[in-house]
Amino acid sequence: MSEGKVIGAYLVPNQALPVLAPEASPGWQSLAHSYAQVRAEIEASDADLLLLFSTRWVSIIGHQMQADPAPDYWVVDEDFHQFGSLHYQLKMDAEFASLYQDCARARGLTARTVAYPGFPIDVGSVATLQMLNPENRLPAGIVSCNMYSDRAETLVLGKAAADAIRQSGRKVLLLGVSALSNRMFGHWIEPASDRIHSLKDDEWNRKILELLGEGRLEDVSQLAREFHRQANGDSKLKAIWWMAAAMGQHNHYRGRVFDYQPVWGTGAALVGLQPTAKAEGGLEYDEDEVDVFVGDRNVLAPQPSKNHE
Amino acid sequence: MEKGRIITGCLAPHPPHLAYASNPQQNEPKASGAGAWQPLLDAYARLRQSLAAHDYDVLVVHTPHWKTRVGHHFLGVPHFEGLSVDPIFPNLFRFHYQLDVDVELAEAICRQAQAEGLVTTMMRNPEFRVDYGTITSSHLVRPQWDLPIVAISSARTYFDYSDEVGEREMLALGRATQHAIEATGRKALLLASASLSHRHFTEEPEDPEDPSFEHIYNPNQAQWDQHVMELMRQGQTRRLLEEMPDFIAQSVSECRDGSLTWLLGALGQAEIPATIHGYGTVIGTGNAVVEWDLAAQEVGA
């Protein structure tokens, strides 16, 4: 079996409104059209697995990999329930989920597969798969977003994905399910008048998209903390950390911004990244490089007493 | 119609571990009985015993596990049934539920809260899955499931704006709850479905109920929990509310989801001593089962 590899990646929105009610807003409609463009690109690729990291699936016990081969249920958005339910029948690559779990554990992470009838697949993953893989042409994998993990742990999770992909022989497209700025309107708006919550969020989103459009994924990964602070980034932008680590932490990509629209105030973008030989840009890197996770550093917890000889 | 009233308010934490350890027939996984959370199970038993002396006709639950960013939402369908699988602890909680909703009371609270200036919404989608916080707290308090409930979501105000803004909203939501209960003639039991300190361990033992694994995440959490419970015991409600933002910030408290402040608001910020039925940890978090018995206060007054 030849070695597997990541053949590309997409950043996709974490909200379901463009799926539930595209006609309600010009921006959501535009995203729906752009999903179709991405879907066509995926269908033209030779990918045999879609691997999602979703900020809408939060975990506490380490990292969870969806391993039910055929999840069949429905999801109702916690806020936007009046827009209807999303019924799903998905196809998951259970073998890959198990391999990913093993690779994550080998790098020191707590990880487990989950396969339970009726498990609530998160609304971000369901919306993404309905738009990009509606007929289940490709099997998928989903990994959760640990609420306590920071950059180091998330990088290790991304590297474990790369390990699993290599070992699996799969040709994989990564999907980071995440908003950019994640400030939502806290009141009911006319969908047609949706806009990015603030000018500051919008400016930061556009700067990040400018870099991603140039293929500078690692540069964005290095900027993620600042972006999160300035623009209320979605889950610290862990999806970017995960994608960058899984793809080798460099800027050797051809980037394409398919779309950027507001969804209830958040920054929703569809961005594609294809590996190329030539590196773009390169800022100063000031973040640590981590290969193995050594556990939580609960510095206030009592330490085991040392034996003195 | 006789004026309604709140009979009792409870802090009723919802770790799914407690429903799991109770081995109810509705829950698919079965626990070993190793006893890690026995202090909390005993605390809930004492709470149920205390509540048995009271007459109430509805449970009103504020839940951190229905997280809404567009204001405060209320279940608005008369009957739900289905399977609730906890996305975080699916190995412990896969609960088949059937429950009735007091839609009239939910709508009344919704209207009152709107009059307080809050953004509110009735949830009318019959396919909505009821969250495990609502189910766990309700089940542990009244496993018979013979009374209707009202379930209120946790608006993300604390997270999207600030803890102080969140506190003000929750006090207003509490006032609205109190007024709606009075106006609809209900005798209500209120449940704030929340832990105190809320930092979890990110791994669990092979038997999740292994008592040798279970302890508080760190001493800071324990000290804050003890301090807050002492304020409750002494009936220092206003001081507790004054210190709430510090408690939230310094102990990663689940009170940031607003449930406890909502409860104290609904109780009129009454300075009455609470009964601590018990305290225990669940995967590192601090949990107290607490009762503010308004009915007993009235009798004693």
Image (spheres, rainbow, N blue to C red):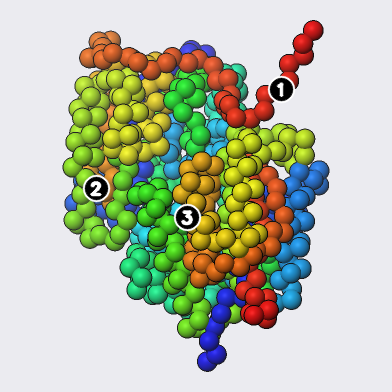
Q: Which mark is residue B242?
A: 3
Mark 3 crowd level (few <14, some 14–19, many ≥20, 10 Å Cα): few
Q: Quick check: can you spot residue B146?
A: yes
Q: Is residue B127 left or right of residue A102?
A: left
Q: Quick check: can you spot residue B20?
A: no
x and y, in percent, of residue B189 in the image: 61, 72
Q: Residue at x 20, y 49 (%)?
A: A195
x and y, in percent, of residue B139 in the image: 67, 62
x and y, in percent, of residue B274 in the image: 65, 63
Residue B162 higher or lower than A203, as above or below: below
Amino acid type at image mark 1 = Pro
Label 1's element?
loop
Image quadrant holding the C terminus of chain A, namely top right
Amino acid type at image mark 3 = Glu
Q: Is residue B10 left or right of residue A141?
A: right
Q: Quadrant of residue B222?
A: top right
Indicate which label's residue lies in the foreground, 2 or 3.
3
Cα separation, mark 2 vs mark 3, equals 31 Å
In the rendered structure, are the residues bearing label 2 and label 1 in contact, judged by CB atoms less than 8 Å apart? no
Q: Chain of mark 3?
A: B
Q: Quadrant of residue B48?
A: bottom right
Residue A234 higher or lower than A17, as above or below: above
x and y, in percent, of residue A151 in the image: 44, 25
Mark 2 crowd level (few <14, some 14–19, many ≥20, 10 Å Cα): many
Which residue is under mark 1? A304
Cα separation, mark 1 vs mark 3, equals 37 Å
Label 3's element?
helix
Indicate which label's residue lies in the foreground, 1 or 3.
3
Q: Chain of mark 2?
A: A
